[in-house]
């Protein structure tokens, strides 16, 4: 990410063209004709009095180096007769951003006298303005139909040729009365401002961590069933989007405009074939590679070309690049490898040799290790530097389950999403740290996806965070350097955990709905579902005394719940109930009355 940011910084600072127009007049107005010096055999002859009009002169500032902190510069010298007295000197500066003539924070200095004739330092680009003077980016809600507070600072007398405003459309979290299914198929991070791109179904969510609401734009690809892959193209400032049945799309990283996508056809000798790819990658040399159920293809800048055909058909699952080698995983077909330097196919990995599973769902590289997740055989580890396989982590040794949904590393802490738990591992000392139950994070489903969101721009969080998804609309936020690491949730959409309802009761503007052993809570004022709470039993009845919620459980007795969903007290057969199966419940002051079955 950091190297990509430097590419953009250098590209921007390289556009340091400026038109510096200096007009000097050495005589009163209305002089008949300008006169300049001329050369004779004996030397230069200067007229007794005259004027000199240089006209418009373009100076190209060169030599800038953002890495070393060197500013670009240009020199321009004017010759005058020795001892000449200059008067009525006029200087004009003109830029034209629409024609590419602009410069960042220019300073014009008369070097022989040591004074600044023009100083634009600290004011950004001269010739264009691509950011607000106030908070940039600016965000606000219409109240009721207008919003103010965003403005630019322009030079006096500036003429605006083009005014382009990227107006994003923030989206409040969606509210449904059915369970929310938001499967995150992929994500990408903008390498300048740090915005998060989330691919969910056939929609692209653009998220600003510091905005309210956090979803600042929503782009839907109506002709696609779902988005399967996102890739950042830093060289071309593009976000490439691959769908499962509508081929490629591309958006500008500058203004989110639609760009020309990668082609949907593969050219092979005299044959042109439409190919729906499953995964793709923009390699470190800028070359795109793509994986389908039957082949690997490479893009030559004009067409896709077949690199090789796989020995067995299988849906493409993931691609990664490590040290000049590309790794392609497919469902039931192991891992194909490709040497970018020699453009040659390497030996294939399957369970017949060293691979732990023939269906590697995802890759993750940390240090000199390639981590390979699977749904049936745990987490494999390969040391690409030495070429040795390390021991596989499974339920037989370190993991709580062989179903590894995802793995990431943040601040030297590896997070393994393993069934309904998150396991942490210190990569520096090689020690497993702790197991976290996802229910403690407000997640009631099995873990599905981990998203690492680094701090690299104004739209990113202040600290690198891990977002945990269980396929619902609420992402748990995990900060590996915080104590405790669970720091809250980010809501994308809210709905109940089930479309069924055992019983419901309202207390202080919150509707409590019991379903399948879980207490769902709907805030009528905020119009959103709150974090569900686990009851762990079928509910026969809910009542309230105006302060607390009382629950009649099918097998666990009666319960007293606070308004935030915490179980405060439980009564069962050991406390005097006729049985643990409570069918009806009533409360009167300090008295609890129940109707039980199996008595």
Image (spheres, rainbow, N blue to C red):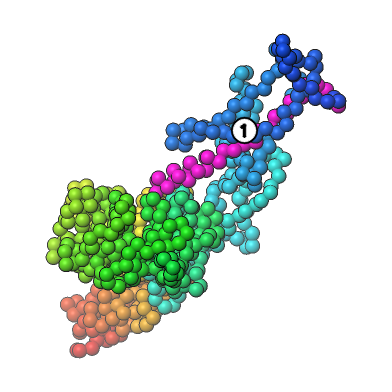
Q: Nearer the viewer, residue 578 or 385?
A: 385
Q: Residue at x 60, y 21 (%)?
A: 111
Looking at the rendering, the stretch of residues picked out in magenta corresponds to 1-30
Q: Residues within 10 Å of mark 1 (few under 14, many from 20)?
A: some
Classify residue 57 as left or right of residue 4. Answer: right
| Residue ranking furthest to the front | 270
Q: Residue at x 41, y 66 (%)?
A: 268
Q: Which residue is mark 1?
A: 59
Q: Quadrant of residue 300?
A: bottom left
Residue 51 in the image: state x and y as whole percent: 78, 22
Q: Nearer the viewer, residue 224 or 528?
A: 224
Position of residue 24 relative to residue 312, above or below, is above
Does the stretch in magenta take in 177? Answer: no
Q: Residue at x 46, y 50 (%)?
A: 235
Q: Is residue 500 visible?
A: yes
User: Judging from the image, what secondary structure is the residue with disc 1 in?
Assistant: strand
Position of residue 509 relative to residue 478, above or below, is below
Does the stretch in magenta take in 21? Answer: yes
Q: Is residue 552 visible?
A: no
Classify residue 279 as left or right of residue 10. Answer: left
Classify residue 204 as left or right of residue 39. Answer: left
The total of numbered circles placed on residues is 1
Position of residue 443 relative to residue 542, above or below, is above
């Amino acid at each position: 990410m950091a190297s990509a940011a430097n590419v953009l910084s250098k590209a921007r600072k390289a556009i340091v063209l400026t038109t510096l127009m200096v007009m000097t007049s050495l005589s009163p107005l209305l002089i008949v004709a300008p006169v300049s010096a001329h050369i004779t055999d004996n030397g230069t002859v200067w007229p007794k009095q005259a004027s000199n009009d240089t006209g418009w002169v373009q100076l190209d500032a060169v030599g800038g180096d953002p890495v070393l902190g060197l500013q670009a510069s240009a020199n321009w010298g004017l010759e005058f007769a020795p001892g000449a007295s200059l008067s009525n000197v006029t200087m004009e500066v003109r830029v034209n951003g629409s024609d590419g003539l602009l410069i960042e924070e220019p300073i014009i200095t008369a070097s022989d006298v040591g004074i600044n004739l023009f100083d634009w330092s600290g004011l950004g680009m001269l010739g264009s303005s691509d950011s607000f003077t106030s908070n940039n980016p600016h965000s606000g809600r219409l109240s009721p139909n207008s919003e103010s507070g965003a403005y630019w600072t322009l030079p006096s007398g500036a003429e605006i040729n083009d005014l382009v405003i990227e107006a994003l459309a923030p989206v409040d979290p969606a509210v449904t009365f059915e369970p929310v299914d938001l499967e995150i198929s992929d994500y990408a991070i903008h390498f300048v401002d740090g915005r998060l791109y989330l691919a969910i179904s056939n929609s692209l969510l653009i998220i600003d961590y510091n905005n309210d609401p956090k979803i600042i734009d929503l782009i839907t690809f109506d002709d696609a069933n779902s988005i399967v892959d996102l890739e950042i193209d830093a060289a071309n400032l593009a976000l490439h989007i691959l769908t499962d049945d509508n081929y490629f799309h591309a958006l500008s990283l500058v203004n989110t405009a639609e760009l020309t996508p990668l082609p949907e056809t593969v050219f092979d000798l005299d044959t042109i074939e439409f190919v729906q790819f499953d995964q793709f990658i923009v390699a470190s040399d800028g070359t795109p590679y793509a994986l389908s159920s039957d082949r690997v293809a490479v893009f030559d800048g004009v067409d896709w070309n077949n690199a090789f055909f796989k020995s067995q058909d299988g849906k493409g699952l993931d691609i990664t690049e490590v040290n000049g080698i590309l790794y392609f995983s497919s469902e039931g077909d192991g891992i194909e490898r490709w040497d970018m330097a020699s453009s040659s196919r390497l030996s294939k990995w399957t369970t017949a040799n060293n691979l732990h599973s023939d269906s590697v769902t995802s890759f993750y590289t940390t240090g000199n290790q390639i981590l390979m997740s699977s749904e049936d055989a745990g987490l494999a580890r390969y040391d690409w530097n030495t070429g040795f396989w390390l021991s596989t982590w499974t339920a037989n040794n370190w993991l709580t389950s062989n179903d590894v949904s995802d793995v990431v590393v943040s601040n030297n802490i590896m997070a393994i999403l393993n069934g309904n738990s998150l396991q942490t591992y210190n990569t520096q000392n090689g020690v497993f740290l702790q197991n976290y139950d996802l229910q403690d994070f407000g997640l009631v489903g099995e873990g599905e996806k981990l998203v690492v969101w680094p701090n690299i721009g104004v739209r990113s969080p202040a600290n690198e965070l891990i977002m945990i998804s269980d396929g619902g609309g609420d992402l748990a936020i995990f900060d590996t350097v915080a104590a405790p690491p669970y720091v809250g949730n980010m809501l994308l959409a809210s709905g109940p955990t089930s479309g069924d309802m055992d019983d419901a009761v309202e207390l202080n503007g919150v509707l409590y709905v019991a379903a399948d052993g879980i207490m769902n809570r709907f805030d009528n004022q905020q119009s959103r579902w709150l974090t569900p709470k686990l009851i762990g039993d079928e509910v026969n009845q809910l009542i309230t005394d105006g302060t607390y919620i009382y629950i009649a459980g099918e097998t666990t007795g009666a319960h007293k719940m606070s308004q935030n969903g915490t179980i405060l007290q439980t009564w069962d057969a050991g406390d005097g109930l006729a049985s643990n199966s409570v069918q009806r419940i009533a409360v009167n002051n300090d008295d609890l009355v129940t109707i039980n079955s199996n008595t």
